[in-house]
Image (cartoon, rainbow, N blue to C red):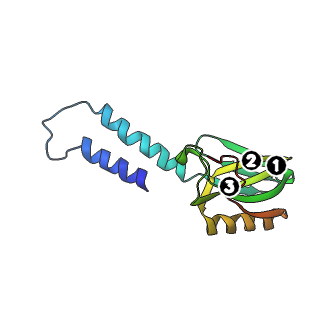
Amino acid sequence: MCLLLLAAAAVGGIYDPLDRSARGELWPGVLFVAVPMMFAVRGFALGLVIVEDKVISRGWFWIRTIPRADISAVRAVNYSGYWNRHGSSMLFLMLKLEVAGRDVEIPAVAGRSVTVQRLAGQMGDVLGRVRRSAQTSAHRNQG
């Protein structure tokens, strides 16, 4: 939502419907509109989707497909991602999957503790896998 407001403010800053006599360069303003709009549109596609025999994770810059049978556990852990410079958040959690013996973080599925723990539980139920509670002290990025 903030990105859409930023884009709207940028449009207001580069376009003046009343003063058509002033002709300036539009490309700097268009850049300030296009970048937030690209992130805002991409934000609608973030998340995790379970489709038949695979789990599709969509992040800001990548899409990862994980075979459903390879997931052995679903956890809610402290958020660590772009928004906090990969530190360990004490306020927000994200999903972490145990895939073929290694941990795969899903920072695109982040939020309040109650919400992410509920999502981890639901995903564990759907996958028929072990679900574990929030690991707030055992996260890999302990400051």
Regarding mark 3 in the picture, which secondary structure is present there? Answer: strand
Point out the image quarter for the N terminus: bottom left
Gap in angstroms between the C-alphas marked 1 and 2: 7 Å
Q: Is residue 141 left or right of residue 35?
A: right
Please say if the residues under marks 3 and 2 sit with CB atoms less than 8 Å apart.
Answer: no
Q: Tell me if residue 41 comes above or below residue 130 in the rendering.
A: above
Residue 48 bears which disc, if any?
3
Q: Which residue is mark 2?
A: 104
Picture quadrant where residue 112 is located = bottom right
In the rendered image, residue 76, in percent from the top left (x then y), is placed at 70, 60
Q: Is residue 82 left or right of residue 48?
A: left
Q: Which residue is mark 1?
A: 99
In the rendered image, residue 27, in percent from the top left (x then y), is placed at 32, 31
In the rendered image, residue 122, in percent from the top left (x then y), is placed at 74, 68
**Tally of numbered discs:** 3
Residue, x 68% and y 55% (percent of image)? 48
